[in-house]
Image (cartoon, rainbow, N blue to C red):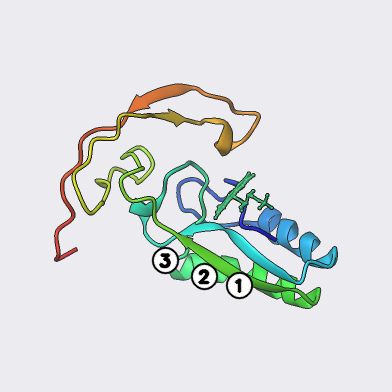
């Protein structure tokens, strides 16, 4: 199964819940041999949409373990897709942290807060401008 962003994780913590366990378990039960997860971010600053799951804390790992166990129990195999959006995030998504990117590019697109990818029923609520960012330092 190709990786597909679902935005089902807890938006504040990026932790996946029982709905995500069930989502992947069902795919394995349907006979999918190899599942590549939705993009999972490797740091809070890697997140480019609301509801994106993380894979950088013990809590994230424990939550994903429930997914892998459920998939394995159905005879499936699962691998995590890791993700970092670089410049394409916004401090509203990162808990106030500055975006990190290799260069201080200005993103001229708009960030659609609560846009379609964050849940079809939610729709676009705010249109946010991306601010200019600082260059990522070697020490980071
Ligand atoms: C809703 C949705 C979410 C997606 N999320 C991801 C993703 O998180 N990571 C990724 O690499 N591709 C993502 N894709 C792209 C798909 O993995 C896939 O490459 C694309 O749908 C083309 O599939 P096809 O080659 O079977 O036509 C997403 C596609 C859709 C429709």
Q: Residue at x 35, y 46 (%)?
A: 94
Depth check, front residue: 53 or 131? 131
Mark 3 lies on a secondary structure that is loop
Q: Residue at x 65, y 71 (%)?
A: 78
Looking at the image, is mark 1 or mark 3 earlier in the sequence? 3
Q: Quadrant of the C terminus?
A: bottom left
Q: Where does the image place residue 84, in percent across and percent down from the top left?
A: 39, 56
Q: Where does the image place residue 104, in percent across and percent down from the top left?
A: 18, 44
Q: Residues within 10 Å of mark 2 (few under 14, many from 20)?
A: some
Measured Cα–Cα span from mark 2 to mark 1: 6 Å
Mark 2 lies on a secondary structure that is helix
Instruction: Identify the residue under disc 3.
Output: 56
In contact (CB < 8 Å): disc 3 and disc 2 = no
Q: Where does the image place residue 61, in percent across and percent down from the top left?
A: 52, 70
Instruction: Identify the residue under disc 2.
Output: 61
Residue 1 vs residue 58: left or right?
right
Label drawn at residue 65:
1
In contact (CB < 8 Å): disc 2 and disc 1 = yes
Q: Residues within 10 Å of mark 3 (few under 14, many from 20)?
A: some
Depth check, front residue: 97 or 58? 97
In contact (CB < 8 Å): disc 1 and disc 3 = no
108 to 39, vertically: above or below: above
Q: Residue at x 18, y 55 (%)?
A: 136
Measured Cα–Cα span from mark 3 to mark 2: 7 Å
Mark 1 lies on a secondary structure that is helix
């Amino acid at each position: 199964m190709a990786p597909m962003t679902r935005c089902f994780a807890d938006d504040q913590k990026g932790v996946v819940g029982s709905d995500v366990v069930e989502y992947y378990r069902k795919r394995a039960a349907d006979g999918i041999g190899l599942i590549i997860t939705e993009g999972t971010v490797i740091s809070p600053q890697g997140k480019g949409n609301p509801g994106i799951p993380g894979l950088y804390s013990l809590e994230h790992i424990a939550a994903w373990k429930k997914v892998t166990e459920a998939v394995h129990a159905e005879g499936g195999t699962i691998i995590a897709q890791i993700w970092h959006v670089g410049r394409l995030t916004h401090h509203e998504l990162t808990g106030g942290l500055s975006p990190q990117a290799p260069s201080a590019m200005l993103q001229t697109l708009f960030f659609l807060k609560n846009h379609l990818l964050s849940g079809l029923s939610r729709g676009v609520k705010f249109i946010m401008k991306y601010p200019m960012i600082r260059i990522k330092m070697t020490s980071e």
